Amino acid sequence: MEPRSLVAAIDQGTTSSRCILFDRSGRPVASHQLGHAQITPRPGWVEHDADEILERVRTCVRAALRDIDADARTLAAVGISDQRETTVVWSRATGRPVARAVVWQDTRTADACERLAAGDPRGMDRFRALTGLPISTYSSALKLAWILEEGGSERRAAAAAGELLFGTIDSWLIWHLTGGIRGGVHVTDVSNASRTMLMGLESLAWEPELLDAVGVPAALLPEIRSSSEVYGHGVGDLAGVPIAGDLGDQQAALFGQTCFGAGQIKCTYGTGCFMLMHTGERPVHSQHGLITTVAARLGDAPATYALEGSVAVAGALIGWLRDNLGIIGDASEVEKLARSVPDSGDVVFVPAFSGLFAPHWRSDARGVIAGLTGYVSRGNIARAALESTAYQVYDLGVAMAADLGQALPDELRVDGGMIRNDLLMQFQADILERPVVAPRIAETSALGAAYAAGLAVGFWGGLDELRAMDHAAHRWEPDMAEATRAAGIARWHKGVERTLGWVEPGA
């Protein structure tokens, strides 16, 4: 391979890490992926071993390079996409985490959210104008406060003295990949920082008001940088390679879908489900349960923004059918099982395992399977599980249109592992009444991270060059009778109502 002829993307997700190497045409030429443990010590708690994630990332980088008989000299840059709100605290002196990472799905901070909201008449919207976020278990701020509190006064003192470092997974990886205790760079980008509930949405800086409210010292926070610039240079297997792109995974997918302008919309179907609409250089503050977030910032250019709706359980539900119910042996079997029946048999499956995220924001909700009769088979359950993802995305789309005061765009761009499920994508087009369009490369989070890094070092010349490389691979057109569609949506909303208030306050 020629020197500097590829860009590497490290895509660190909720259930796995991968490294994909892209050439100048945006084509993947090598890839390696490894899973990591999902640690659930109590109901509602989800943790990761940050050391395990780092080791898996390094292994993926080595394996991807080895597969094409290449080394670091082949790489022009490295970009990172990460799982966003997941929170890590580690020792500056040892480089080791002081506790397991608290994952974005984790709900242990529900009571802390209630206390923080109770101190202000705006309630859960206390900081929405400043951050674009409601107070929720989703954001990093209260996860960080919990980790500090769990370690007692000694840990808090160490944090205040700058002996501990905080970061989302991107910060953890960049610090280690650029040298760790021997001079690692402690940074994050604006898209990840915007998900912590500690950064001002328009100031793009850590806000003292937020730090004081949550009880987090500024000394352990990373420096906020743009999404596309050289942060530092790699060591080890990435020796000398610029680490030059950093985006939260859903913003990376928006970028990888070449949704660079206001009004473009994409949805990623993975462990969770995430719909983002680009709103340009103007943040749109949601009145309908969505998040306002930074989309990206390229170097010194102005930041761009997006509206986002997040669903906690999408692909994770298929894993639950396999691991907990045992009605499939592999995730790939779910479509065949769902196709064994003509419909869901009027069954509604609302997977509120960690409460309901957008647009409801109800941490007291828990999952239900409703409408069971003696007629229902495992095929109906499988079909209802797939349909639940499409209905949740529909609810996000309705909220997004309401916030913008206009209809959704003419098509929805989709990506992520679940788009290989043809039944789901057709049902999504039917429920949304919009064409659903898949790109040539499904793993757009990795592609977006590569694009950001490549732009920073001149590997690609600009956004127009990236747009020219964008090609659709598949398109699903809506094809459902309106009466059938309306009845299904009504049943879904009836099921959602049944989930609410399941968890008693303080439970």
Image (spheres, rainbow, N blue to C red):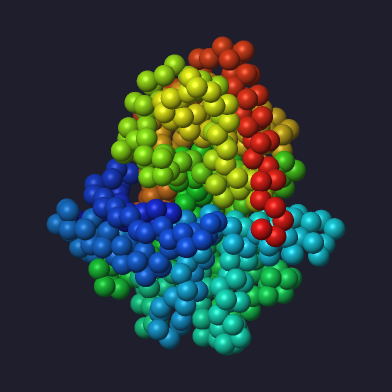
Q: Estimate the x, y position of residue 346 in percent, counting from the top left.
A: 55, 22
Frontmost residue, 250 versus 111: 111
The relative height of residue 256 versus residue 158 in the rendered view (above or below) is above
The picture quadrant where one finds residue 111 is bottom right
**Is 25 above or below relative to 419?**
below
Q: Quick check: can you spot residue 196?
A: no
Residue 8 appears anywhere in the view: yes
Residue 112 image offset from top left, x and y in percent? 68, 65
The relative height of residue 38 versus residue 30 in the rendered view (above or below) is below
Residue at x 14%, y 57% (from the top left corner): 69
Residue farthest to the right?
121
Q: Residue at x 81, y 56 (%)?
A: 122
State the image coordinates of residue 310 (x, y, percent, origin top left). Answer: 57, 45
Which residue lies at the image location 47% right of the left edge and 67% below the top edge?
A: 101
Q: Residue at x 41, y 28 (%)?
A: 378
Q: In the rendered view of the protein, which quadrant contains the N terminus?
A: bottom left
- Which residue is most to the left? 69
Towards the viewer: 396 or 434: 396
In the rendered image, which quarter contains the C terminus?
bottom right
- Residue 333: name its quadrant: top left
- Left or right of residue 335: residue 225: right
For this view, does 144 lie left or right of residue 10?
right
Q: How many numbered discs, if any?
A: 0
* Residue 342 figure quarter: top left
Residue at the far front: name it.
Answer: 374
